[in-house]
Amino acid sequence: MKISKKNLPFIGLSSLVLLTSSFATAAEMSDMDHSSMDMSGDMSGMDHSSMDMSGDMSDMDHSSMDMSGDMSGMDHSSMDMSGDMSDMDHSSMDMSGDMSGMDHSGMDMSGDMSGMDHSGMDMSGDMSDMDHSGMDMSGDMSGMDHSGMDMSGMQGGQPPADARSPDYSNGVPYGQYGKPMMMGSMPLWGVSVDDLGYQFDEDQINFEATGWYGTDSNRIRLRTEGSAQTKDDKEIDSLSSLAYWKPLSIFWNGEAGVAYDTENDNAAVMAGIVGTAPYFIETDARAYLYTDGQLRLDLGAEYEWRLDQHWVVIPEVGLTAFSKDDHDNGITKGFNEMETEVRLTYETFSRQLAPYVGVSYETALGKARGQRRQEDESVDSSSLTAGVKFWF
């Protein structure tokens, strides 16, 4: 007990000296100069995980600090930089070394860094593997200057010499075919013959064909439909049109152009809408304004009932209406006639060729029935049909 009492003054004096030294060290950090500090050596194994930099470092100068060495294994995960670093100068700091393995995941930078200057800081080294996942930078950094900071070693900047060219050609010329383009932007063409058949009872050939050229957004369409008699005077009645075609929505397309009708030997302006109605019913509506003021409206609907991969049943119906009477051409005001047909087709050659057999039926409507009776013409007619439809 006596020995302990004699040592108490010595222990108290030692504690006072250590406490004084700690305050002196913390005070001196605020004026530390790192301007010529050389850290270009190998620091890959340095551990800063518990480093406390919470003191006042507002006057520290890192302007010429060289950190070009290998720092790939440095660990700053628990580094505390919550102190006042508002006047620190990193303007000439060189960090071009290998820092790819540095860990800043737990680094605390919540202190005041508003006056830090990084304008000349060089960070062109390899920092691809640096971990900042848990880094706390919640402090005041509103006054930090990074205007001249070099981060050319990080993502961005100039592409490497072996990078791919913007058009993916890699310097290889396109050759005689020129630059490739998207399929929807290429001008293409096509021909579709929807009906080329013979009506046995009427002794005539029916036809309906369409040809087009253009893209998925703009096309020119040439369309013709009608019939040709195979006996007596072999008269051909057809309605042909040349129109501009453009999609209006997902399922509907618009047409506008000019037309010519051989039955009444008259030209017309044409406009129409063609598309797919609910339940996959192919629908078309076309209006023709003739030069004599006559207005014609054609309505049609068609459905493909697929029995298997080859056999298809196709029922269709068409209506024709006029705006005024034209007795010279056998036309009455209102709906004039209705045409229906049911065909059984067999698709071959990737569905591009489909021969068919079927039954057709035609009837006059409204006042056209009485006019046909007065002219000793049939009001109703039906016939067996056979033909082919194809496209290419």
Image: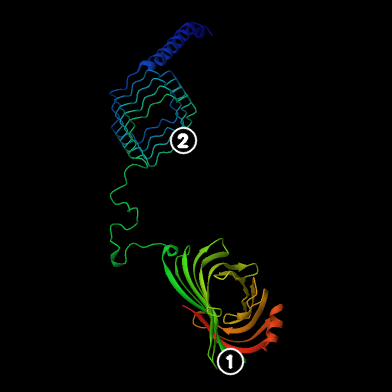
* Residue 226 in picture, x, y percent from top left: 55, 81
Q: Is residue 195 visible?
A: no
- Report the amino acid beneath label 2: Ser
* Residue 60 in picture, x, y percent from top left: 36, 20
* Residue 76 in picture, x, y percent from top left: 42, 32
- Left or right: 183 with respect to 326? left
* Residue 152 in picture, x, y percent from top left: 32, 39
In the foreground, 196 or 285: 285
In the foreground, 46 or 202: 202
Q: Assess disc 1: are there few (<14), some (14-19) or many (≥20) residues with their C-alpha within 10 Å of its C-alpha.
A: few
Mark 2 lies on residue: 105
Reading the chain from its start, which is encountered first: label 2 or label 1?
Answer: 2
**CA separation in Å, label 2 and label 1:** 90 Å
In the foreground, 208 or 367: 367
Element at label 1: loop
Q: Is residue 147 visible?
A: yes
Mark 1 lies on residue: 203
- Left or right: 205 with respect to 154? right
Which quarter of the image is occupied by the N terminus?
top right
